[in-house]
Image (cartoon, rainbow, N blue to C red):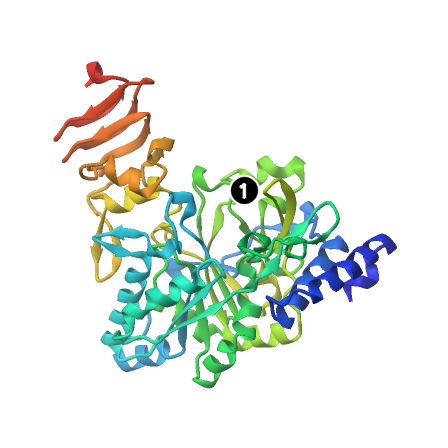
Amino acid sequence: MAAATLSPADSEKLSKLQSAVAGLNQISENEKNGFINLVARYLSGEAQHVEWSNIQTPTDEVVVPYDTLVPPPDDASEIKKLLDKLVVLKLNGGLGTTMGCTGPKSVIEVRGGLTFLDLIVIQIENLNSKYGSNVPLLLMNSFNTHDDTLKIVEKYKDSNIEIHTFNQSQYPRLVIDDFLPLPSKGKTGRDGWYPPGHGDVFPSLSNSGKLDALLSQGKEYVFVANSDNLGAIVDLKILNHLVQNKNEYCMEVTPKTLADVKGGTLISYEGRVQLLEIAQVPDQHVNEFKSIEKFKIFNTNNLWVNLKAIKRLVEADALKMEIIPNPKEVDGVKVLQLETAAGAAIRFFDNAIGINVPRSRFLPVKATSDLLLVQSDLYTLEDGFVIRNKARANPANPSIELGPEFKKVSDFLSRFKSIPSIVELDSLKVAGDVWFGAGVVLKGKVSIVAKPGVKLEIPDGAVIENKEINGPEDL
């Protein structure tokens, strides 16, 4: 369909690409078709340019304040009924490479020797035990994480949860020069391929057969979240609201801080609720988009979606989310990855809403600076839930900036004898060859930047408040 709007040159490009992709026997027909459709849409230039003057701030009916949700029923049997409609799906396609780890990111140890995946399993186990419910866990892997994940989930075989895994699509990287797939140039290893973003969760759920299986078990809603967001736990108030109001899609949003200015926001646009990403914003409006005054909320990527609605839209091929072009380089060859995001699907669902949730539901661990937060006394671990310390008066977390010496998890752990107390910390900057003793307390604004060639050791029990430290003489 999209090919009809292509120029003759682009039609020829697509036709050559189609022939080359047909010969790639590593992927399924569904994947080949999905990829060609994505490229055809990209070539036809159907980029969503938003008419800035038509943007409206969503009302409380569209983005519902969390505090206005009615509490779930008190009766345990009613809660069991609610939970039996639910499936939890974690996006598990990412590797821990940015944090210096091999294998899936979800197996990095977060706290008390427990990994992201351990905590997710413990949380759902507790729910199922408490209410006698059967909430299954689905893991959407990529070809990068699939084999490792299958081995890892073996350890949960005696738990009271059904764990299902499925793979998201595997698409060939496009060589920019001649618009042909990288694997057809002899790059048949992993470098030739990419997973096309989490917008792929909907077709992959369907293609894997999991969607029909879940519907046949009477499941109604899927709660989708990133596996590294420790705040993304099952919330009965949200589930109850969606079931009562028959919402097909719900995006959890939370108030922006200065750290989140690039995050996508929800807008009302031409009668529907829509996600607006920074890439869609005309250049002259980028600063306005980043302003916390006008666009107050951002997408946490915690999404609740009705399974029947997913089936209807996937079968109608109606989920045409905005395409995110992601240029990369593989061994000196410039390639293109075309991706989509799950949050952008909101505008295709009926009766879609946002819920403005507390910040506690957004606690992602993207770097060792986040690991420092969740391993510190700012949080405790209860029943698999990471709970914030009430002793901290400031609702915002301290800002933490760690130098490249702390980037890998193994280096980070070796440089702290124990994680410092940071309950009263506002900001921390650490760079250079810095080593922390045990029982260190950090308060206010602290900067510890070792001079080049200087090994700076913070002694056991040191209390550092509103201080700049560049060498041993400053301690």
| The quarter of the displayed image where residue 90 is located | bottom left
Kindly identify the residue that appears in the image at 25 percent across and 53 percent down. Answer: 387
Q: Secondary structure at mark 1?
A: loop
- Whole-percent x, y for residue 409 in the image: 32, 43
Q: Residue furthest front?
A: 186
| The quarter of the displayed image where residue 474 is located | top left
158 above or below 323? Answer: below
- Residue at numbered disc 1: 294
| Three-letter code for the amino acid on which mark 1 is drawn | Lys
- Whole-percent x, y for residue 66 in the image: 39, 59
Left or right: residue 33 compared with residue 372: right
Would you say residue 260 is visible in this rendering?
Answer: yes
Camera-nearest residue between 295 and 228: 228
- Whole-percent x, y for residue 372 in the image: 28, 41
Kindly identify the residue that appears in the image at 39 percent across and 54 percent down. Answer: 103
Would you say residue 396 is visible in this rendering?
Answer: no
Q: Quadrant of the C terminus?
A: top left
Kindly identify the residue that appears in the image at 53 percent across and 44 percent down. Answer: 295
- Whole-percent x, y for residue 351 in the image: 56, 69
Kindly identify the residue that appears in the image at 20 percent across and 14 percent down. Answer: 473
Camera-nearest residue between 129 and 337: 337
Camera-nearest residue between 48 and 29: 29
